Amino acid sequence: MRPLHLPSPALAELFNHLISCFPEEGCGVVLGSVSDPHAARFVPMPNLQGRLHTMDPAAYPRDARTAYAMDPLKLQRLIDAAEAQGEALLAIVHSHPGHPAYLSATDIAAAAPFGQPSFPDAAQVVVAVFDGHVAELKAFQHDGEAWLERPVSGLPALPGPPAGAKRLGEA
């Protein structure tokens, strides 16, 4: 599987946005050229999960601290505009505040609501944020049958989650 390349300027914007959203989940997308992996940019998106939870907690039991939701119309318009400029959706990004970077069951359900990914060519990037710093970044890609961890190039050394950090819902 080809590595997802995240150039330094895009990574800096991505990290800054996700840190600024802490203790809530932040989200956004990476757009860029498929042929030139160094031409990628991060676009932050509002996390609507808190508002959805407030409006209908039965339908949206998780708030923005443990889930994210992007406006699907805004996302599609962004993708359409990028494609008109020769760009593609390279990755969908969100953070796990206070938890390791892993693809949770909730993440999989959001990425593939009908069993197959809504954006099969885009990676799912999950970033662990702990107390004002990025600890870990992982990318995942669906290969047609299963979600696999995808290599990421361009990453600086990250400290990893603190000892004892647990996935959401683990005791």
Image (cartoon, rainbow, N blue to C red):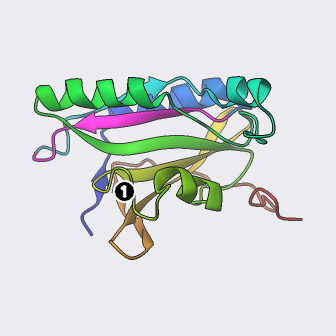
Left or right, 73 with reference to 105: left
Rendered location of residue 20, percent (x, y): 62, 23
Left or right, 154 with reference to 38: right
Q: Residue at x 17, y 34 (%)?
A: 87
- The boundaries of the magenta stretch are 25-35
Rendered location of residue 88, percent (x, y): 21, 39
Q: As drawn, which residue projects farthest toward the bottom?
A: 145
Q: Secondary structure at mark 1?
A: strand
The image shows residue 142, relative to residue 11, as above or below, that is below
Q: Residue at x 16, y 32 (%)?
A: 83
Q: Is residue 11 visible?
A: no
Residue 70, magenta (yes or no) = no
The residue nearer to you, when weighing 125 against 154, is 125
The residue nearer to you, when weighing 14 against 145, is 145
The image shows residue 42, relative to residue 1, as above or below, that is above
Left or right, 79 with reference to 46: left
Q: Quadrant of the C terminus?
A: bottom right
Query: How many numbered marks are there?
Result: 1
Q: Which residue is mark 1?
A: 152
Residue 8: quarter of image = top left
Q: Is residue 167 visible?
A: yes
Q: Residue at x 79, y 42 (%)?
A: 61
Q: Residue at x 73, y 39 (%)?
A: 60
Left or right, 124 with reference to 57: left
* Number of other residues with Cα within 10 Å of mark 1, as a class: few under 14, some 14 to 19, many 20 or more: some
The residue nearer to you, when weighing 53 against 59, is 59
Give the amino acid type for the residue marked by disc 1 in the picture. Answer: Val
Q: Quadrant of the N terminus?
A: bottom left
Q: As drawn, which residue projects farthest toward the right?
A: 171
Rendered location of residue 112, percent (x, y): 46, 57
